[in-house]
Amino acid sequence: MDWFLQHEVGEGKLLVGESLGSKDKGTMAAEAPGPRPLVLGLLLCALSAPVSQGGKLLLIPVDGSHWLSMLGVVKQLHQRGHEVVVIASEASVYIKGAAFYTLKRYPVPFRREDVEATFTSLGRGVFENVPLLRRVIKTYKKVKEDSALLLSACSHLLHNKELMASLAESSFDAVLTDPFLPCGPIVALYLALPAVFFLHALPCSLDFQGTQCPNPPSYVPRALSLNSDHMTFLQRVKNMLIFLSESFLCNVVYSPYEPLASEVLQKDVTVQELMGSASIWLLKGDFVKDYSRPIMPSMVFVGGINCASKNPLSKEFEAYVNASGEHGIVVFSLGSMVSDIPEKKAMEIADALGKIPQTVLWRYTGTPPPNLSKNTILVKWLPQNDLLGHPKARAFITHSGSHGIYEGICNGVPMVMLPLFGDQMDNAKRMETRGAGVTLNVLEMTSADLANALKAVINDKSYKENIMHLSRLHKDRPIEPLDLAVFWVEFVMRHKGAPHLRPAAHDLTWYQYHSLDVIGFLLAVVLGVVFITYKCCAFGCRKCFGKKGRVKKPHKSKAH
Amino acid sequence: MDWFLQHEVGEGKLLVGESLGSKDKGTMAAEAPGPRPLVLGLLLCALSAPVSQGGKLLLIPVDGSHWLSMLGVVKQLHQRGHEVVVIASEASVYIKGAAFYTLKRYPVPFRREDVEATFTSLGRGVFENVPLLRRVIKTYKKVKEDSALLLSACSHLLHNKELMASLAESSFDAVLTDPFLPCGPIVALYLALPAVFFLHALPCSLDFQGTQCPNPPSYVPRALSLNSDHMTFLQRVKNMLIFLSESFLCNVVYSPYEPLASEVLQKDVTVQELMGSASIWLLKGDFVKDYSRPIMPSMVFVGGINCASKNPLSKEFEAYVNASGEHGIVVFSLGSMVSDIPEKKAMEIADALGKIPQTVLWRYTGTPPPNLSKNTILVKWLPQNDLLGHPKARAFITHSGSHGIYEGICNGVPMVMLPLFGDQMDNAKRMETRGAGVTLNVLEMTSADLANALKAVINDKSYKENIMHLSRLHKDRPIEPLDLAVFWVEFVMRHKGAPHLRPAAHDLTWYQYHSLDVIGFLLAVVLGVVFITYKCCAFGCRKCFGKKGRVKKPHKSKAH
């Protein structure tokens, strides 16, 4: 086996698993007089982990909400004794220094303000009510501009000889990265380090390509399709059309990384190869939010990973919640990227919020709408998960990013979803089909629509029952997602990868994978056999009947 | 969503997960001052489990080694406070009464001796050196006879009105069964109970059909193919031919269950539907022994589940091991079904065993071979896992059943494999490609072959290194397989199934699954558009050029 011959036994700094033979575990288990605690083996493993003798992890994040959702894992890895080095450009907006990791910055030819402007314009663009064709052209232009900026940052990292040399000398055990931008995977390949990918999903099924995971378009809804897993014939046609067009759609963003990677790695590399380089994929999903579908052994599902970290409410928020009385509170946030919306829309929303008896805590940094009701409190930031976890939380108005959706699920709070861009429409669709919330089109909705949706999810008991059912299923798991993520990062550090989980499909061409050469060969054999049999029969017939026929004829003529 | 609308929130007897909201977990986690223990959430869950308020589980096993490998889970479920009722025929050989479950027997029109005879003849048949064609015919006849016996047992269970009525009244929470024979799935459907399947694998890819798991023949080796995951073109052709013939091969054993199930369930049922009825598949495999391939969310891998239960050696075996000196011991067993082999073969083996300095502990119930050496001790039974776990274990001679292979892996003992039937050839192939052992053909091998193989795996360090590497990978897991199996059985009991893990593929026809209708429709549209465009162009050309042509000609003729 390739993986076995190529990879030596991991003798890294972190031999946690090895310090505890199964013999010890087994003996203790056998000696336990009562019921064997469900976690005995794992507990022993965790307690014996040499927390102070940590490894070295290189982290290459993607700025924005992607980075924020990684923080829990980084904190936990630091607490378990690992040294985490984070690489970010000097223009990063969200990636800042912290006590639990070492931040190394590299210069780029643009400013932090430029990146901030791309985030702001992303949020603002959503609320511009322009015709479809203009919107498509605008989005295309924006994606092209933004990805050029990000590509430039990646190029400046890869061409920063001093930094790359210092990384090469640092003898890291592994790279943790978000492959939404393929810069991390290129660095991992350059440093010949095993990589762990941490993400929600990739556009254009790049995650399926990278893991070699089958992705039947007949029941696995494509991103942005708004399909569920049960599709009508026309929905399946739409799904297939998206599937067929995916490779063209993503070329704008991803194909420029191919020449860059090929130059740095000094060999031809495709985006699929970059994506296929991960040892483990930590995917922020599960099958309570997402539909059941084929997966691969290298995929680890850690949906709800951010939900565990809860803190008591500050005095300010505690006061708001206590003052809400029997009606309770509604939590309203459109995510880290959108905190300011056009005044007209803000007034419509403020009007709707005034129509419900609940106290609404709204994360909003813009000018307060003049018609704001007394029950609505604007805040620049809110402890979303802590508020949703309060028994008085009655509803959650969200842009349905996967982070927020999981906070809604794990706290069991029904949702009014205002999806803005990306996978948010699909997330909203999933929750809606499960009866756990109502989706509204933020551009087209009226004040009455929002008020009615809020009243529905608060007063119609089915929404609460459905979200509580999802919550129970989601939280009933053998191991917490944060622990699972940390385990697999450490596994890759200990064993220098996870080559036994890599499918042999990576070593096949597309036609070999689909057995087209074998099918062609078997068809040729069958046709050959049929042809030869036919020829033989025909020849036989000619020999037998042909002669007889010829023999008969002269006989006949002779007889006549 | 179907699963959501059809299934009410589980309000069964076992609301373990529900007794502990994430809030409590989260708060404790946040308050922990040092590194958060990897298993805190799980530990809290396990400690709060109401062990004394167990549920009721119906267990329908398959006699033989299949049953023996289930015992660990049954014991654990009993210890966790569940009442387990085991259903077995009066003629069962291995299924006997025990303190940790209630055994209910039902009468069948054959005796225990008849079943014993089928087991014995299975083992004996292996050593008969007959020509291939005769062997195939003999095997076919034996399979047909044996499966008729087993079908008859199933029919007598399903038609035992008294027993079935008492089962219906017992209000079980779930059924745990081995679907190798589809009797358990039929009972589960009859009682409208969610089912957990516990197995190694099913023949003819029935497990893939039941889970709707993709199974590309280009890199997933078919059972009995002896292929690895990296195949040559001709091996892929062989794999494809086995894949194409699978549905015919299994008809002998499985198709008779269709009319039986249809009669009992009063509706038409196929074998695939019976296999597709499981909520969770507990599969005794992992990706250290098996090759990486697509899986489904309902599949839980518990390979090595039997390895944890270890006991200290009895005085008898302790004495043998201590007396072995520096050379250590070799453990030799051909599994629970084969303990007696023809004298000639036994003498060959005894001769080979005499050529190594190790003490050989051989499980053998036949007449001792006259040439038995002093270093070889025959025993009627041996504590295989405990002996393999002893530091003096140098090699393991095994028939390479999955149970034994995992005991070899988890104890890190290199193997000489003598596969006899079923999946044993494939198991041996997997270990051989990983450099962890040597495979011999038990019929064709000579005494020298066996002696050389033993010397190789004992003296060539690479075998020990390779099996130790596999052992480390296998045992480095976030949760022990026994705990995982128990968790998922309890999950199904708590939630009355796991419908969220059921893929929508179950609701598609085969041509819908492969999108053949969509592809046909799109092709028709494309061809239609091409045809209409062509016709329009042709019409246009005729109108334009046709007229011009006709106009020009007269001009020309006029000019002339």
Image: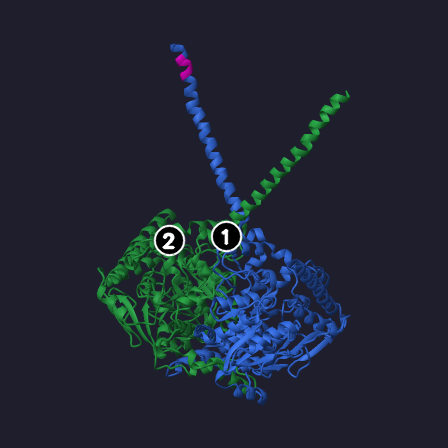
Chain colours: A blue, B green
**Comes first in the chain, label 1 or label 2:** 2
Observer-nearest of B143 and A515? A515
Residue A366 visible to an observer of this rendering? yes
**What's the amino acid at mark 2?**
Cys
**What's the amino acid at mark 1?**
Ser
Within the magenta stretch, is there residue A74? no
Q: Is residue A509 left or right of residue B413?
A: right
| Residue position for label 1 | B515
Residue B452 visible to an observer of this rendering? no
Residue at the extreme front of the image, as rendered: A371
Within the magenta stretch, is there residue A555? yes
Q: Are marks 1 and 2 in contact (CB under 8 Å)?
A: no
Q: Is residue A210 above or below residue A373?
A: above
Query: In x, y percent, where is residue B50?
Result: 38, 82
Query: In x, y percent, where is residue B295?
Result: 48, 63
Q: Quadrant of the C terminus of chain A?
A: top left
Q: Is residue A126 left or right of residue B445?
A: right
Observer-nearest of A431 and B35? A431
Give the chain of mark 1. B
Q: Is residue B141 above or below residue A303?
A: above
Front: mark 1 or 2: 1
The lab-note entry on whether marks 1 and 2 share a chain reads yes
For the record, the magenta segment spans A552-556
What residue is rendered at 31% in x and 72% in y? B172
Q: Pointer 2: residues within 10 angstroms few (<14), some, or many (20+)? A: some
Query: In x, y percent, where is residue A391?
Result: 48, 83
Q: Is residue B10 left or right of residue A308?
A: left
| Residue position for label 2 | B250
Q: Count the numbered circles shown.
A: 2
